[in-house]
Image (cartoon, helix red, strand yellow):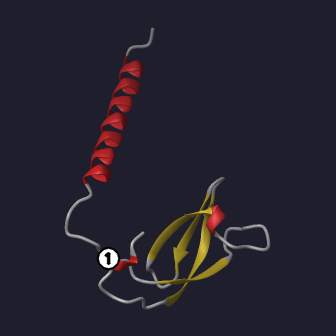
Amino acid sequence: MNPGKMKYGDKIIYMEGVIVEIHDGSVGIDLKGRLGFLSIPVRMLISDSELKIGQEVGWNMSFPEQLSPEVNESYFSNLDAYKKRQAEMTAAKNAKKEDPK
């Protein structure tokens, strides 16, 4: 993380949401005000009690800022390779279904 790359200063805003999903390692939160959905690791959520669907959460947040007009090629190539592997696995699974022995 390099805060020196950012052009604009922080404008911290308070956000709220409602827990709508709880998984082994993540929590899904619907943001109030129809602002979208946020999924975070459970370890990032501060809680003194057991998490339950429907509980409200709040946090301070700033706006994301694009750091560069350039594409990060390493992330892009990793994503492309992941999609290719997924397509290959799906094709192999479908071929296996069509050819039962």
Please report the residue visible at 20 percent of the width from the left and 64 percent of the height from the top.
Answer: 70
Query: Label 1 amino acid?
Result: Lys
Few, some or many residues within 10 Å of mark 1 (<14, 14–19, 20+): few
Against 22, residue 60 (above or below) is: below
Please report the residue visible at 32 percent of the width from the left and 52 percent of the height from the top.
Answer: 75
Between 35 and 41, the one lying in front of the other is 41
Between 7 and 26, the one lying in front of the other is 7
Asked which secondary structure carries label 1, the reply is helix
Please report the residue visible at 73 percent of the width from the left and 73 percent of the height from the top.
Answer: 47
Quarter occupied by the N terminus: bottom left
Would you identify the image quadrant in which residue 85 lies? top left
Would you identify the image quadrant in which residue 55 lies? bottom right
Q: Residue furthest right?
A: 49
Using residue 85 as the reference point, say whether residue 50 is left or right of it: right
Using residue 12 as the reference point, say whether residue 68 is left or right of it: left
Against 40, residue 25 (above or below) is: above
The residue pinned by badge 1 equals 5
Find residue 27 and report its horizontal and vertical position in percent: 60, 63
Using residue 15 as the reference point, say whether residue 81 is left or right of it: left
Between 7 and 32, the one lying in front of the other is 7
Between 5 and 88, the one lying in front of the other is 5
Against 84, residue 55 (above or below) is: below
Count the marks: 1
Would you identify the image quadrant in which residue 72 lies? bottom left
Please report the residue visible at 31 percent of the width from the left and 40 percent of the height from the top.
Answer: 81
Find residue 34 and report its horizontal and vertical position in percent: 45, 80
Quarter occupied by the C terminus: top left
Q: Residue furthest left?
A: 69
Find residue 14 and report its horizontal and vertical position in percent: 53, 89
